[in-house]
Image (spheres, grey):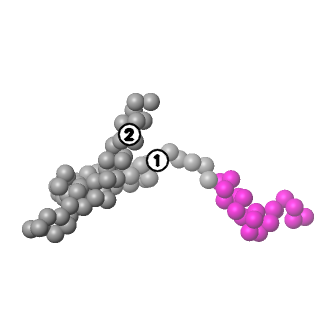
Amino acid sequence: MLKRIIEIIAGIALAICLIASYSSSTEPGRLLIWYIIPPRFLQIIVWIALFLLASRLVWGKPKDQSKYFYDLFVKLFGDPKKRK
């Protein structure tokens, strides 16, 4: 339960950092996340996340899709067992 509460708080804090912006009289408005995490570091994090996502998609668990395609062909062309 404590882990879930921490996840919710971290999610809310991240959402606020992504939405909130800060501006001063000398600088134009910038997102708050850019003050906390430098853009180069955030770019590295995004690259790692995309690499992990791509590896999960490429080497994910194999799933048997034959039933799905059989049902799709039955919908499109009719059941071959009933064609006689």
The amino acid sitting under disc 1 is Gly
Q: Where does residue 68 sit, x and y in percent of width and height? A: 66, 56
**Counting residues from the N terminus, which is met first, the one under dot 1 or under dot 2?**
2
As drawn, the residue found furthest toward the front would be 25
- Report if residue 80 lies within the magenta region: yes
Q: Where does residue 17 sit, x and y in percent of width and height? A: 28, 54
What's the magenta region? 66-84
Report whether residue 51 is seen.
no
> Viewed as shown, does residue 56 lie left or right of 13?
right
In this picture, is 3 found above or below 14? above
Q: Quick one: SS at disc 2?
A: helix
Q: Is the magenta region chiefly helix, strand or loop?
A: helix
Report whether residue 35 is seen.
yes
Answer whether labels 1 and 2 touch (C-beta < 8 Å).
Answer: no
Q: Quick one: SS at disc 1?
A: loop
> Viewed as shown, does residue 37 lie left or right of 25?
right
Picture quadrant where residue 8 is located: top left
As drawn, the residue found furthest toward the right would be 84
Residue at the (28%, 58%) spot, across then down:
20
Picture quadrant where residue 7 is located: top left
Q: Where the N terminus falls, by quadrant? A: top left
Given this view, does label 1 or label 2 mark the residue nearer the observer? 2
Residue at the (34%, 53%) spot, across then down:
15
Q: Where does residue 18 sit, x and y in percent of width and height? A: 30, 57
In this picture, is 3 found above or below 30? above
Residue at the (71%, 58%) spot, across then down:
70
Residue highlighted by disc 2: 7
Residue highlighted by disc 1: 60
From mark 1 to mark 2, how far is it between C-alphas? 25 Å
Q: Where the C terminus falls, by quadrant? A: bottom right
The amino acid sitting under disc 2 is Glu
